[in-house]
Image (cartoon, rainbow, N blue to C red):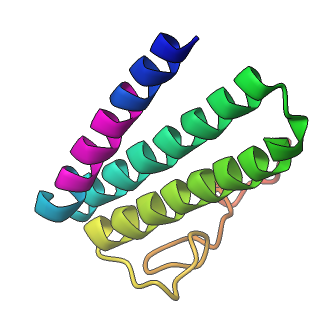
Amino acid sequence: MTALWIAIAVLLGLAALLGTARLMLGPSILDRALSVDVLVASALTGIGAYAAFNRDPSVLPILLVLSLIGFVSSVSVSKFVARRHLGEHPGDSIAGGPGGAGGTADTGGKGRNA
């Protein structure tokens, strides 16, 4: 059991070290976002291994909240980069953005059932 704990600690430590290196060296914001995802995944795996070995279900809410924070941060960074890449401003909505049709399809003056 101790050898397994050592192997888990070494692998998670290596993943965290590589994630931290990418966080510091990453030239783009996507590299940094990916490294934060690696760090969150390493923390989730470490807490999950602790819960499994000690049969302690009290840390499951921590796992849930941490995974939700990781997911929401990844999605928000992705949306930020996508909008920045397309040249949109953060205040514009997708439906009413510059040059947008307000979310309605062009039917050529005809009704829905044409």
Within the image, what quadrant is residue 87 found in?
bottom left
- Side (left or right) of 3 relative to 66: left
What residue is shown at x 73% (from left), y 45% (from top)?
63
What residue is shown at x 63% (from left), y 27% (from top)?
49
Could you tell me if residue 113 is visible in this image? yes
The kind of secondary structure the magenta stretch mainly shows is: helix
What residue is shown at x 64% (from left), y 59% (from top)?
69
Q: How many marks?
A: 0
Q: Does the magenta segment cover residue 113? A: no
Q: Quadrant of the N terminus?
A: top right
Within the image, what quadrant is residue 72 found in?
bottom right
What residue is shown at x 50% (from left), y 49% (from top)?
40
Within the image, what quadrant is residue 81 found in?
bottom left
- In the displayed structure, 87 sits above or below 33; it is below
Q: Quadrant of the C terminus?
A: top right
The part of the chain drawn in magenta is 11-21
- Side (left or right) of 9 relative to 10: right
Could you tell me if residue 27 is visible in this image? no
- In the displayed structure, 36 sits above or below 94; it is above
In the image, residue 5 lies at what x, y percent?
51, 22
In the image, residue 50 lies at what x, y percent?
67, 32
> Which one is in front, 57 or 4?
4
In the image, residue 64 lies at what x, y percent?
77, 47
> Which one is in front, 54 or 44?
54
- Farthest residue to the front: give it: 2
In the image, residue 52 lies at what x, y percent?
74, 23
- In the displayed structure, 85 sits above or below 88; it is above
